[in-house]
Amino acid sequence: MTGRTCPEYDRCILADVTEHGQTVPRTQLQTLLGVIMISMLTMLLYLGLILEHRTKIQAGHLPRPIIWAEPGSMIAIYTSVTIWCQGSWEAQKYHLYKEGNVNPWDTQLPLETRNKAKFNIQYMTTTYADTYKCYYESAAGFSEHSDAMELVMTGAYTNPSLSVWPSSDVTSGVSIAFKCSSSMGFGRFILIQDGKDSFRWTLDSQRHDNQPFHATFVLDTVTPNHNGTFRCYGSFRNEPHLWSKSSDPLVLMVSETKNQSPTHTEDGLKTYQKILTGVLVSFLLLLLLLLLLILIRYRYSCKKKATQRDANLQLTSGVPETTYRDRLHQKSSSPDATINEKYLYASVKNTQSEDNGELDSWNPPDKDPHGIVYAQVKPSRLRKDTTSWRPKETQVVTYAQLCSRTQEYDNR
């Protein structure tokens, strides 16, 4: 490469000599190189953005794994424990790491089911007591991290003591206090209930004068849901995953009160609603019973009226002669009083002037002291020569019953 100089610096154009002997101005070469570099940087940046976007999209489709420990997250010293991590069917590897560490603590291949892996700990020691998370990787990328799980080792120190005030056998609604204490300088105490992993209560320890370190757990209102066995542990603040041995178990018995007066407005309102509902139901039942009685009485009255109406119709239609004669014979045979009765029965039938009827009468003999007269109208058939009778006209029939009764008493 050769060049030449020019006396006038501002007008001088430097040139480079190529392999073929041609010269290229240096300014053009610098411009060309700048354009190439800018283009390459732009392309790389674009590719990086595409890859990042693709990775985020692919990772978003991967379900978040879950982590748990068997037989539990509280493991006694020198016992075995298994940590499980469950993810996706596309998972190729599972990674377990302790919180605060960048590199995975352990890596396992998925099991035959491929959607989970297990991490075995043969003997629980202080080394394994920590907070764990897990994630997995697949052809689509890495998944998100699981929730944190605290693996606690118990039995590192001597056990504290646990007591309850006022008693371990109480009624529902009262307030109780658990006291966990120890002669060791524990920075905090933990109260748990057997069978309920969600119930874990941690309080900082306190110390007054020369008393041992302790913490008081107050339950303002106990219910039968608090029935169970309680234990407490102690730990130091700088080693929160190392707990002491368990205290002696304390069994709490909460019983229902039979005649417990309401202590809250809601309880009083519920009681009032129940009473009001009972009163309304009783009122409705009484109303239905009253309506039923009225209906029965109404039906009985209607039936009684119908029976009376039938009896009146039978009396109106007439009674056979033999019946009245028998009755008269019975009355006339009474020796205590002399009663003269006159019965007059007449059945009058009003028809047209052309109608004919025969009146049949029967007078008792003069010897009859009662003087009863019977009269009966017997309808007769129309004569053949009668032409004025109209069969279509309605006939008006009138029945009258007369009873004349005279009673005489002998003056003795």
Image: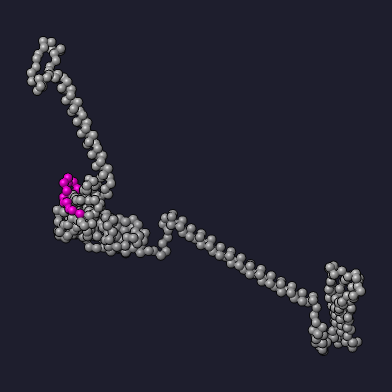
Residue at 25%, 57% in the rendered image: 191
**Residue 341 is inside the magenta segment:** no
Q: Is residue 37 visible?
A: yes
Residue ID at (18%, 46%): 100
Q: Quadrant of the N terminus?
A: top left
Residue 312, located in which quarter of the rendered image? bottom right
Q: Residue at x 80, y 86 (%)?
A: 326
Q: Would residue 331 be found to the left or right of residue 125 on screen?
A: right
Q: Return the x and y of residue 318 as percentages of the image width and height.
A: 80, 78
Which residue appears at 91% of the width and 87% of the height?
A: 366
Horizontal side of residue 386 vs 318, given as left or right: right
The magenta stretch spans residue 103? yes
The reply, left or right, for residue 351 in relation to residue 118 is: right
| Main secondary structure of the magenta stretch | loop
Q: Which residues are magenta?
A: 98-110
Residue 10 position by quadrant: top left
- Horizontal and vertical percent position of residue 371: 88, 83
